[in-house]
Amino acid sequence: MQFKYPEIFWALFLLLIPIIVHFIQLRRFRKTSFTNVRLLKKVTAQSSKTRTLKKWLLLFSRLFLLAMLITAFAGPYRAQQQIGENRETLIYLDNSFSLQLRNGDQSLLEYAIQELVQGIPESKEFTLFTNDKTFKKARIKNIQNELLNIEPTYKQLDLQDILFKAGEMLASDMHQSTNLILLSDLQNRFIPEQTIEPINGISSRLVSLTPDEWTNIALDSAYIAGTGSDQIELVVFLKTNSAEVESVPVSLFNGETLIAKSAASFEGTESSELIFTLPAEEITNGRIEILDAGLAYDNVLYFSIPPRSKTRIMVIGQNANNYLDRIYVADEFDFSYIPVTEVNYSELALSSLIVLDELRDISTALENAIQVFVENGGSVVVIPGSSIEPGAYNRLLSKLGLPQLDSVVPGSLNITDIEFDHPLYRDVFEKRVTNFDYPMASSHYSIKGSAPQILGFQNSKPFLLGDNGRYLFTSPLSIGNGTFVNNSLVVPTFYSIAWNSLKTPALYQNLSELITTDIPWVANADEIIKLRGNAYEFIPLQKKYANKTTLTLVGDPRKDGNYMAISGEEEIMPLSFNYPREESVLIYSKPDLPSSFELLENMPEFIASLEKEGRVNELWKWFVIFALVFALAEVLIQKLVK
């Protein structure tokens, strides 16, 4: 039992007044002589006992009467939380895409919001946050409309992130007790791999939101497998979490025009691959669709095929090496070989990639031109010759931020180490190969300094190193000095270098915190590029170079779909964005929770606990009734006890 006004209990000192009156008799007695007092003694003894009993009964009834009245004025009540206690309630509502699964005739997210709106007492103040929104110190009637309009998102905080965020919210306003309530479907990605560290002062309740059915089919990804002069092959990859799914129809649109339709067959597996053969033409508003009753967000995959834009590559060398023109074919690249004596330095800026192929010497003019080219966003590959002028090479390498070449190290070494996590090889290999037909080099240069290694020798020395558009081979690549140019590694290596030199948009990009893409379009000083979608347009961060414009997208776009890069009203290039597909992996588990956590199995159990927590049972009426009872008892004592 708690009290609203405990200071009223100071009035209990008033109980001393009837006690003092009882023990200090103010009446005066006078003696009277009688001749025969035997009978009077007996009567006096009986009267004295009755009066004493009556006085004690009256004293206790008055004491209890005053005590009950004082207690009633102190405001007694029963509640889980003391009135006026400085306690904070934080509610985390998981609004990730997996909450699109159904619970009855509505989604899990809609169900959770409805239960919150109907179950939270109107007078209760709380802070509610989702994966992308926060409502601080609000009451349900003030944020009801915003809650009903919350949309699912691809973003997902894991349990440890939520605890840290709750701790940050309370860092400047710590309370004696804080309740954290988490509403989630408990997907595996919600549970961190490391041990959960509770936050001091926060007691947590985790409410499990369980769907009626979690069978789902997802459009996982798409890519172009092959291109020809008149057609392309578009591969669509689908996934399901149920072995009972047999097939699903797949439709392919350009805008609102249906251009292809087929069926993906799973045949008892969890994946399916479908190939569409399409005309080799621009598709600005591509869209792949399936019909599925599971998650809605992964039933659509947006893509765009921009007009073909060739990457310009210039090779500057002493003698032409034909392995590069076999890699950089005319369908995809604008390739040119320029003898070192015929270089037109004004044309360097028009290229995306320059390869310095086994030059004996690097002139000061070429050195300065390459430096300016790289500063303007160009990429360069340095391949040393077997006989070089080290001073000239090292001056250029120093300006490029690459290690300097030292002495020649003779002896054949196999090239065995591949850094699969380097940006150059990311998403290039289907799997990490550890045993393959190793290329070899007959000799190589030792280096001074360091840079990220891409390929390495069997003795862990680097064969290819660099990043951010600046690459250095430590060995000549001519056939007489090794087998690298005849090995299968040469194609993905040089192809990836060229592709990274001009990051032309892929079919689509997944929305994330940071997206960078290059557009082969040169703007004037006062021109800007906007991205326009169906619902809105925005201006991305952009940096202009001599042969391209680099767009950096931070926070935008917020929705998936097809967008068009425009300048004024001129359409430049289509771009497509999709939500990441991590939420389609519907694997659930119950976490190993610390003792400070309480796991509730459903929303009704949570709402009942919330109502119980907010309920206040006022008791003052009972104490008034008790006071009346003791007042009545005093009256009865006065009349009945003689």
Image (tube, grey):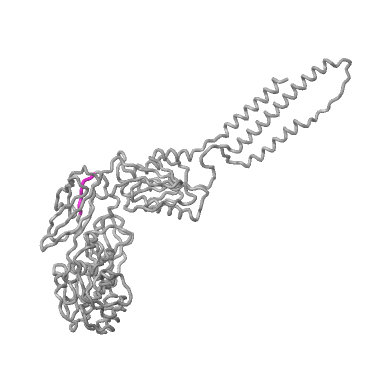
Exactly how many numbered labels are in the figure? 0
The residue that appears at 58% across and 34% down in the rendered structure is 620
Snapshot quadrant of residue 325: bottom left
Question: If the image is split into quadrants, where does the C terminus sit?
Answer: top right
Tell me: 159 left or right of 371. right
Examine the residues drawn in magenta and state their main secondary structure.
strand
One can see residue 545 in this view:
no
Question: If the image is split into quadrants, where does the N terminus sit?
Answer: top right
One can see residue 638 in this view:
yes
Residue most toward the front? Answer: 411
Q: Give the percent coordinates (x, y) of residue 132.
A: 37, 53
The residue that appears at 32% across and 51% down in the rendered structure is 153
* Relative to 112, residue 172 above or below: below
Residue 619 magenta: no
Looking at the image, which is closer to me, 235 or 636?
235
Q: Give the range drawn in magenta.
A: 287-292
Snapshot quadrant of residue 378: bottom left
Residue 291 magenta: yes
Tell me: 425 left or right of 594. left
Looking at the image, which is closer to me, 460 or 42?
460
Snapshot quadrant of residue 393: bottom left
Q: Give the percent coordinates (x, y) of residue 436.
A: 20, 64
* Relative to 200, residue 518 above or below: below
Q: Give the percent coordinates (x, y) of residue 138.
A: 45, 48
Looking at the image, which is closer to me, 6 or 539?
6
